[in-house]
Amino acid sequence: MQVLIELGERSYPILIGSGLLAQPDSYAGLPRAAQALIVSNTTVAPLYVAKLRQALQAHYGQVRVVELPDGEAHKDWQTLNLIFDALLAQACDRKTVLYALGGGVVGDMAGYAAASYMRGVPFVQVPTTLLAQVDSSVGGKTAINHPLGKNMIGAFYQPQRVICDLDTLKTLPERELSAGLAEIIKYGPIADMALLDWLEVNMDALRARDPSALAHAVRRSCEIKASVVGQDEREAGLRAILNFGHTFGHAIEAGMGYGAWLHGEAVGCGMVMAATLSERLGLIDHALVQRLKALIARAGLPVAGPQLDGQDNAGRYLELMRVDKKAEAGEIRFVVIEAPGRAGVRGAPDALVREVIDACCLRQ
Ligand code: NAD
Ligand code: GLY
């Protein structure tokens, strides 16, 4: 099956299915070049590089691989430079096509490298985590982290295609599968309450990796993301709703040290906080917060925030949240649920945010 991202001349398809990695059709019509570089990591490369490389050999004179160290803690300048080192060492020209084979960390870094190398070379996303298939590989956000803030350095740069081979999810660790479920759940309260209903019925099937449940969840998530990105590619407004739970979540990730909490875990917990804030702003009732919290817990995700500071926990969250791309003139902006299935972006008084953090975090 296929979902189209409609962005004029930068439109591209998201292919979703089983066995796509080895199917020649998956690569039909992609730019041809003398060289292709597969960007992967030390965990994913041994599992899937051979299959991808074999498929690409029909289209490129040389197919090389660069293996990055694995993990969010390596989503930085130093690791990004390994991609540039490989491109330059192999004298790759500006037609070289990059293939990002891995989860969101590889996808974000390979995408940023593609955006910058020789001011832009084509790239293809081959996401192998649930999170990357339902979110990060789609829509052209690329970035690396800075010690002071998550995804703070990057570019909007669209791939030529996204190839989601559902078979790759068979080797995904349980905890990573749960992290991906967080980004699927996100689409319910912000855009599609029918998806939330469906997730409540099908959560066990998803966690058991039922192929048809996974295919439905990936397709519906990509459709929603494609619609939002198609209306607001560069986040002038609407696209910010895709960051539901992320303002609190990014504070957790940065505050705990990148990699301690998975991105999806932090987003899951962040959604409980953002929903609680929405309730306290009088936008939604408590029943929706409870519904969301129960679903996030059933996905195997934490629902209580960690303590980031023994002295002033809420103060530390606030400090970290001020370093956020949505912040305007130092004011933190939160994605809130305006009504079931509809989200917006608002500021909130610090005192109220402190109450939410106190209510949602584990006691020491
Ligand atoms: P990840 O890339 O770290 O992958 C998770 C782990 O699973 C890694 O250890 C990886 O090596 C391993 N792995 C990947 N595929 C596997 C497979 N098929 N089998 C076995 N192991 C496999 O994490 P993620 O959750 O995919 O992505 C999180 C990142 O995505 C964060 O950096 C986040 O900021 C970013 N993100 C970006 C966007 C965007 O729009 N660009 C959206 C959401 C998240
Ligand atoms: N994951 C948020 C976005 O793509 O905008």
Image (cartoon, helix red, strand yellow):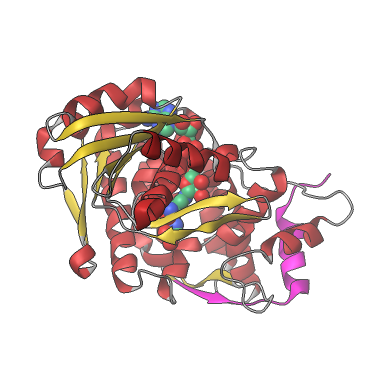
Choose between 38 and 310: the one closer to the eye: 38
Q: Quadrant of residue 335?
A: bottom right
Where residue 274 appears, as percent x and y from the top left, is 59, 63
Q: In percent of the image, x 30 and y 42: which residue is there?
A: 98
Q: Is residue 156 left or right of residue 28?
A: right
Where residue 284 appears, as percent x and y from the top left, is 54, 72
Q: Is residue 313 left or right of residue 268?
A: right
Relative to 186, residue 53 above or below: above
Choose between 188 and 82: the one closer to the eye: 82
Q: In percent of the image, x 31 and y 47: which residue is there?
A: 217
Q: In percent of the image, x 47 and y 42: which residue is there?
A: 105
Relative to 361, residue 127 above or below: above
Choose between 260 and 301: the one closer to the eye: 260
Q: Quadrant of residue 353?
A: bottom right
Where residue 292 appears, as percent x and y from the top left, is 52, 55
Residue 155 visible? The answer is yes
Is residue 248 a member of the stretch shown in magenta? no
Where residue 130 appears, as percent x and y from the top left, is 38, 40
Q: Quadrant of ligand 1?
A: top left
- Find the magenta span and give its range: 343-364
